Amino acid sequence: MFRLLSGCLFLVWLGGFVAVAEDSLPPEVAPLRRDYEAKVKAEVAEAWSAAELDLGVKYAEALKRAQEAAQQRGNLEEALAVAGERDRLAKGGAVPDRDETGTHSVLVDLRATYRQSRETMEADAKARLAPLRTDYLRALDDLTRQLTQANRLDEAVKVRALADAERQGPVTMAMILGQDHKAGEGEGKLTEALGSGRWQWNGSPRFPMIFRQDGTIGMEDWERKGLVTRWKVTGPATVMLEVTKGRDANLTALLEFAEDFASFRGRDFDGKELKPSLRID
């Protein structure tokens, strides 16, 4: 935590972000921050979200294969363990950071692979962020010099304090994903939006889709074909659909929602690009 009382500047380190009273900083800071955040989103965060979604799909597919293999061998304990993991994830659970005592070895191995992949993804994301952060801090330093040369000394002190505070912390995932994602609030907002109406599928309102609170999808066409489909929020703007009953192939679809949660795109169960699909009501 950092505080500089002169000029009523208040700086607090929060999981990779420096929160500053906006009205205490010179107006030149805001566009620098907006430009930085826009670049982080475009060059780092969006790539992370896509990779995270892909990893979740691969983990779900690995679990399905593991359950099928266990059932073919007649290993009830292993099949139940994997089925339990699949059910937990379908209901919105996450892969735990650590395995509890007694976790079945098949899950220990699958989770270890998942965690290793995620660590590699995080390292790549942080490496992508580093030069953007360096440019942002350099811009703050340049602004400090400009304010000093313009005899705006109090404002120069505030900008220098902001830059110094930003430098104190390490590069974190919170810088990439934002505080909403870190706190889980982003997923909560999407979940709330999903439950508030009906949705087109592949750009067509013919068979409206409903995200039920029990984690299943309601759609007349799919249900008539005997399909049971579950949904899971996998990020602040991403959802994975998984067919759990009714067919044995092409089981997952990936949805990516717009910032206002009023529409989505993505890939259908055949891996084809979905047409923009709108919320109907």
Image (tube, helix red, strand yellow):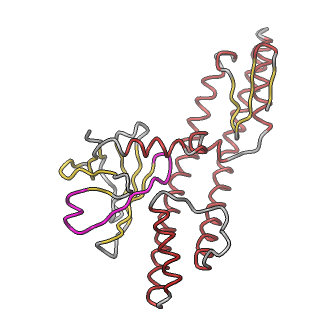
Residue 165, relative to residue 242: is it above or below? above
Name the spot of residue 203 as percent of width and height, x first.
Answer: 25, 48
What's the residue at 50%, 54% (across, down)? 50
Span shown in magenta:
219-237
In this view of the protein, which residue sits in the foreground, 225 or 16?
225
Instruction: Tell me, yes or no, whether the highlighted magenta stretch contains residue 229.
Output: yes
- Image quarter where the N terminus lies is top right
Name the spot of residue 148 as percent of width and height, x first.
Answer: 80, 14
- Image quarter where the C terminus lies is top left
The answer to whether residue 90 is left or right of residue 120 is left
Residue 184, relative to residue 153: is it above or below? below
> Looking at this rendering, what residue extends furthest in the top direction?
151
What's the residue at 63%, 29% (across, down)? 33
Name the spot of residue 207 as percent of width and height, x first.
Answer: 20, 53
The answer to whether residue 92 is left or right of residue 23 is left
> Looking at this rendering, what residue extends furthest in the bottom direction?
73
Q: Quadrant of residue 135?
A: top right
What's the residue at 28%, 45% (across, down)? 198
Instruction: Tell me, yes or no, whether the highlighted magenta stretch contains residue 263.
Output: no
Q: How many marks?
A: 0
What's the residue at 65%, 41% (across, down)? 175
